[in-house]
Amino acid sequence: MVLIADSGSTKTAWCLVEDSKKVIYTQGINPFQQTEEDIIVVLRQELMPALNPQLSTLNSQLSTLNFYGAGCTPEKAPLVASALRQVINPDATIHVESDMLGAARSVCQHSPGIVCILGTGSNSCLYDGQTLHPGNPALGYILGDEGSGAYIGKRLVGDILKRQLPEDLQTLFFEETQETQATIIQKVYRAPLPNRFLASLSPFCARHREHPAIHQFLLDCFHQFFLRNILTAPWSHEAKTLPIHFVGSIAHHYQAELNAVATQLDLHIGQIVQAPLQGLVTYHQEKE
């Protein structure tokens, strides 16, 4: 049996290749934001109870676990692997890879393309059909992550609190989110996982995307993503010839705005998928 996990900073999706229609969700696992002990708690309290009906079979027959996750750099991957090994069948072969490789294998399979993640965070790379070629560094929600949910949320609250958006939008924002300047400051600077909080504010833009100010705001957010991550990457010359694929909830919900900016820049959008899990199932079925 083969278990696959696709993890972002907000949630993780798990499924067995042999039963790919059943997907289990837990909170996100990111070794840059959580300790090994934190990850073990998530696995024991959320994953294992959900797997309970299949637990005995999983422990005896699981051969491989392929975990693709945000923050799973070569330095951090062993931490995640250790947590998985302590909770799930220790005899299984465990592969911990980056969410970027998971996205590339999902949308490209074995074909070349430029692959982008737009979820809570953002990232991009060139995929030659087998290997990733990194682009500009993502840098996280404070220094980078352009076009992501956290980036949109960060810019949105900054523009609201600094009165850069029309008064009607300011009023709507506080009414709909029930946030205040004080609660925003507390959640961003003092509460854990502020990137998740900021990303949770981005649906406000989706609800009001027809407002001219929000429409322009979104176009600028995605223009910044293309400018700072695609058009200035080491492989930027490939951007005019290869399809640019997107994975993630933000890409899925803002397809119209993404396509509009890509058209302005004479770039070709390939697939846009909300989650890479089913593409990864296909990839590993063929591999097996």
Image: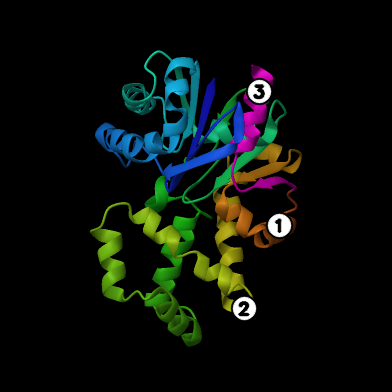
> On residue 7, which mark appears?
none
Mark 3 touching mark 1, by CB under 8 A? no
Q: What residue lies at 41% left-to-right and 73% top-to-bottom?
A: 177
Residue to which mark 1 is pinned:
259
Mark 3 touching mark 2, by CB under 8 A? no
Residue to which mark 2 is pinned:
212
Residue to which mark 3 is pinned:
285
Q: CA distance from mark 3 to mark 1?
A: 31 Å
Q: Secondary structure at mark 1?
A: helix
Task: Tell me which amino acid carries mark 1.
Answer: Asn
Q: What residue lies at 35% left-to-right and 21% top-to-bottom?
A: 85
- Image quadrant for the N terminus? top right
Q: CA distance from mark 3 to mark 2?
A: 46 Å
Q: Earlier in the sequence, mark 3 or mark 1?
A: 1
Q: Secondary structure at mark 2?
A: helix
Label 2 neighbour load within 10 Å: few <14, some 14-19, many 20+: few
Label 1 neighbour load within 10 Å: few <14, some 14-19, many 20+: some
Nearest to viewer (mark 3 / mark 1)? 3
Image quarter of residue 284: top right
Res. 154 visible in picture: yes
Location of residue 129 with respect to 28 vertically, above or below: above
Location of residue 114 with respect to 148 vertically, above or below: above
Q: CA distance from mark 2 to mark 1?
A: 17 Å
Q: Which residues are magenta?
A: 268-288
- Image quadrant for the C terminus? top right
Task: Farthest residue to the left: give it.
Answer: 190
Task: Tell me which amino acid carries mark 3.
Answer: Gln
Task: Farthest residue to the top: give it.
Answer: 91
Nearest to viewer (mark 3 / mark 2)? 3
